[in-house]
Image: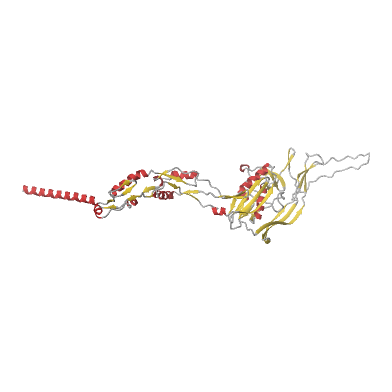
Amino acid sequence: MAKKVNRIRRAFSLVLFLLLVATAGTMTVVSLLAPRAAPGTTFAGMSLDGMTRQEVLRAFERWWEADRQRIITLESHLLSKNPPPQALETLGVEPDFEAMLDQIPFVSALGSWIASHPSATNVHPRYKPAEPKAEGLAQFVSEHALPKQPARVFYRDGRIVRQYEATSFEFNVNLLAERAVAMANKGGERMELPVRATDPRVPRESVDSIAEVMASFTTRFNAGQVSRSSNIRLAADRLNGIVLMPGDVLSYNETVGRRTTSRGFKPAGVYANGRHGVDYGGGICQVSTTLFNAALLANLKVVSRQNHSMPVPYVPVGRDATVDYGSIDLKIQNPFDHPIAICSEVKGGKVTFWVLGRKAPELSVSLVVDGHSSWGPTVRYIDDPSLEPGTTVVVEPGSTGRRCVTWRLVMRHGKVVAREKIAESVYRAWPRIVRRGPRAPTPVANPADGAEHATTPPLTPDPSPDGRGEQAHLTHLGNKVGVTLPHDATLHLH
């Protein structure tokens, strides 16, 4: 019985041994028959001949360990300086091993015995997008983006000078990896950072279309009046170069801003309800008046305009335009289907405005003021005990009241094709204000010569223009007299 059991055991052991030998042989055959890289296959300077897919994949992984730190140069013309170079992996790039394996011709051992070897193959690196580490780049873009600037067109020494709009900038993080992958797949080592300017309000081609002088107008001022001259220059500079697209409206007050010391304006002569005074921004109405006339001659639309309380010396009546921040504004509109620009220059006691755009050579514009009427001022006396008896001092010369109508004539080849009423201007008659001393003493008659007793009639204040007979309140400041204005007085910064 025991012998029989031993025979069974030996038989089982033999069968098991034969199974192990057969398995090992099968594995060896399979290994010998597994596809391998064809002879002549190379990648990044190394040979992949005879390597299996797993062996090639491990070779790719070793290559990526070094390539991931490859430095890429970044550029952008929208930044004040270029960003620091970045590692390839930081830009959101990772290897596409499957695309690289697909380039390799794998052949089995049996196939290599039967078929001819393919030609030599050089495997190229392939990449795909990953999540970029762009926090530092985003911060860099926000700190070094070029400053925003509006489109401007200037007229200097007879030449048109253009400044194109610089808008805000957007850093497209989502596009960063895509752009980096495209660069890497081409074997590049520098790329343009995906920074995009937002759409401009005034496109470049619109700026380029402003090519001619449509009209201009000049007024003169006393350059020796330093504060007034400074205000004129400051206001004109803030209007210089502004581009108006079709339908745009220019507000003088919004553009020039509030007339304060913090904004650079100085005290200078103004009109205040028919009287001469001093306030911050004196002189800027000459700027608005000059702009108004240039706009009329360029056939722009006048949306809002008001004349001064009195005629001004630098333009004819009916051709002036006063402004007062918060209450009286000059507004002009571009009525054309093309952009225009407002340009200014202050030089040698002259302020000039140009309107640039596209001129219609067959058209011309002229201005006519008619319908004139006038009326004289009254005289208001103010008793001033500080003066010598019987003497008078003119405080305000007063002004004659005027009324007129301003027309714009548009002519084509010299023939009137349009007549437009621009405005009816009314300048109030402001009283002549005179200070006078106390009445002279009554002379005493000499009884010896029989002269009659002389008397002086009492002085009575003249009625004010509103008919209420009020006298202006005087404040004595040394040799000067300040006139206290009504609370609703309007200042015209002439």
Side (left or right) of 428 relative to 108: right
Residue 340 locus on image (x, y percent): 60, 54
Q: Residue furthest top?
A: 478
User: Residue 464 appears at what percent x and percent y?
Assistant: 75, 48
Q: Say which residue appears at 31% left-offset and 49% top-offset.
A: 41
Q: At 34% from the left edge and 52% from the top edge, which residue is drawn?
A: 99
**Percent position (x, y) of residue 259?**
63, 45
Placement of 259 over or under 332, stated as above or below: above
- The percent coordinates of residue 364 (x first, y second) are 66, 58
Nearer to the camera, 51 or 112: 112
Left or right of 205 on screen, residue 288: right
Q: How many marks?
A: 0
Left or right placement of residue 22 versus residue 42 in this view: left
Q: Nearer the viewer, residue 141 or 362?
A: 362
At a point 66% along the width and 55% down the height, the residue shown is 297
User: Looking at the rendering, which quadrant does residue 62 occupy?
Assistant: top left
Q: How is the image coloured?
A: secondary structure
Residue 366 appears anywhere in the view: yes
Does residue 488 appear in this view?
Answer: no
Q: In this orientation, which residue lies closer to the viewer: 423 or 238? A: 238
